[in-house]
Amino acid sequence: MKKLIDYVKKSGQTRLGFVLILLIIYWLKTLWAYYVDFNLDTQGVFQNFIAIMNPLPVGILLLGLSLYIKNTKVFYSVAMIIYIILSVWLFSNAVYYREFSDYISISTIMATSSVSAGLGEAALKLFRLWDIVYFLDFIIFGILVYRKLLRWDKKTFHKKSSFAITALSVMLFSINLFLAEIDRPELLTRGFSNTYIVRALGLPAFLGYNANQTYNAHKDRSGATASDLEPVKQYITEHYAQPNDNYFGIAKGRNVIYLHLESLQQFVIDYKLNVNGVEYEVTPFLNSLYHSSSTLAFSNFFNQVKAGKTSDAETMIETSLFGLNQGSFMVQYGGSNTQQAAPYILSQNGGYTSAVFHGNAASFWNRNNTYKQWGYNYFFDQSYFSKATAENSFQYGLNDKIMFADSIQYLEHLQQPFYTKFITVSNHYPYTTSLIGDEIGFPLANTDDETINGYFATANYLDASIKAFFDYLKATGLYENSVIVLYGDHYGISNSRNPDLAPLIGKDSQTWSDFDNAMMQRVPYMIVVPGMTNGGIFDTYGGEIDALPTLEHLLGIKSDNYLQVGQDLLSSQHSQIVALRTAGSFITPKYTSYEGKIYYTETGLEITNPDETTQKEIDAIKEATAAQLATSDAIQTGDLIRFFDNGLPALDSSQYNYIDSLAAEIALENKLGTQSTSLYSKNGNKSTIELFKAPSYLELHGSTTATSTPNTGTSSTSTSSNSQ
């Protein structure tokens, strides 16, 4: 130990040594924050290696700037100021994270009043005993200076050497970024999560990244004026599709339950996987819903996402506005834009309470901030559920059965009517890691692509999870008083893999075309209205942008009062033009434009030399899709809803807090007393947790042999006496 102290004292007597000491201490404190205060969810050696190295490049760059200074006092002053700023920034984020499960952004700094309001008098309670770690170095430095054990080095550092330090930091940062992109491709362009940025590049880099995002968003926003609303309102008026009288208001006052079917594609519906001459029904329960007279099912419903993937789907489902052409709207604008989303609209049109249930980190896709702007009262993320382990979760969160089971304790305390969304994750790429133990059993496909091979098994697991949740709804009586909407968010098998999938779905890999890729963008969309008898399968062409107007009309709410670019799928006035985010791409019953080629939708034949009439029709469709996308983009990037007055009260996102939500639910129940409408209250203040049952694949089928036990249909997935 004495040798170490002597070495430190000796090193600290040179300028470079002093900077290195500051760097090492900052690095160690950062690692303490990473593994004690933050939940970076690092998995595997590679992610941990990136997290361990990422404080160094920017630390070297910033602290190394002081080496350019010749004046001795100024050098030490600047070096310490930079170090103090880095340390304060680190500690501030550690404390902030304890309350908000996120990192301090530019928007947070610019809106300190809302931050202080969120922390309030509880701020002092956020400090922990171990916070002494963040200040111990300053105490030691003070003692060393007081005892004159630290001496100033008056010898200037050579300019070329200073530049070499800077060059080293740039090289290390480039390596860091390269490794981060390997771990998470398109990390910066898609902006998955603030946690991902911090885990990959560090806190200072996150601040720079966030500053750039904030600048771009502010630039677009500051250039918009109220006059920009006029063409938008004109578009909304001209393209409004009147509701279908047969369905308008049939679900009025009912609970709304959205079930997000991760990566599920339409081709899986009614699909049977043939393995060794035995057919295995992949989604028996979803198939039964699809063909039920109580279901409005759509066979030509397309995902319209781009880089934002799931976040784009959520944005469209909740607001009937598109995601961005580049990046994620939820990440770039979701936490700051004025929005009128389904949760808030329903809270003002029916007194709905709203909640999201998701077994992943709250910060993924910036959900914890966006959901407040959408008006969600509660957000039950991974922190509310079972601790994630190798047995119950994988890299994208808790497996679906666990998520549903853990959600019941919160769902039953929600005041009715409620608007809820359950986001599943188990059917997520790579489809090879989410199922273990007793859940293994559904056969794998036999192709050269492991991703495709595993897709059907995880889809079957998702199906069983949904079945278990439906059984719970029926057992508790929630089913009859709800409308349940199921939707696939985006493709699960990418276009590059589709040729390998082709033989499994009756296609030829050699003749597979971009038209086939376009048709593979179909995803399930089903609206279950218990008690309805005039449901069926509709072949209307539409997409995720149309979901909210369709739901609003079923609930008896006219969608023309809001800035929404989608149309009611049940309306006879629906245009049946599906705009895709890639410029010039669209799908209609007659024509499909995809990857720069035009096809006849009915036959899949490419149109290489259209006649004048055909060309005019295609040009008109292109103009229509461009107008829809442009209108949505104007609203989103210009934050135009802030200028829009439709009688809906302004939403104050600072009033939403996702901490201790169960306590808040129970407090509201107690306050309402006999007026409480929660399931728990209606059930005589008795819990319904035991009514949720989700048997494993082994329990349902009695075998874990991957190719021996066929899925024999809906009856085999029954998890209670109330089977669908």
Image (cartoon, rainbow, N blue to C red):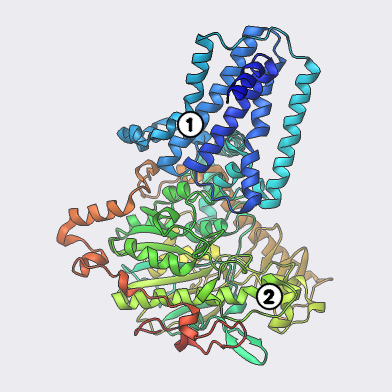
Earlier in the chain: of badge 1 and badge 2, it is 1
For residue 633, the mark is none
Of residues 30 and 565, the one nearer the viewer is 30
Callout 2 secondary element: loop
Q: Position of residue 268 (x, y in %)?
A: 60, 78
Picture quarter with the C terminus: bottom left
Callout 1 secondary element: helix
Task: Judge from the rendering whether residue 207 lies leftward or rightward of residue 170; answer left or right.
Answer: left
The quadrant where residue 495 appears: bottom right
Q: Amino acid at mark 1?
A: Phe
For image coordinates 45% across by 82% down, the residue present is 699
For image coordinates 47% across by 40% down, the residue present is 37
What residue sits right under mark 2 in the picture? 590
What residue sits right under mark 1 in the picture? 91
For image coordinates 46% across by 83% down, the residue present is 700
Task: Judge from the rendering whether residue 691 lies leftward or rightward of residue 568; answer left or right.
Answer: left
Of residues 671 and 255, the one nearer the viewer is 671
Q: Position of residue 559 (x, y in %)?
A: 43, 61
Q: Amino acid at mark 2?
A: Lys
Q: Position of residue 621 (x, y in %)?
A: 67, 65
Q: Position of residue 71 (x, y in %)?
A: 68, 7
Inspect this view and state whether residue 565 appears: no
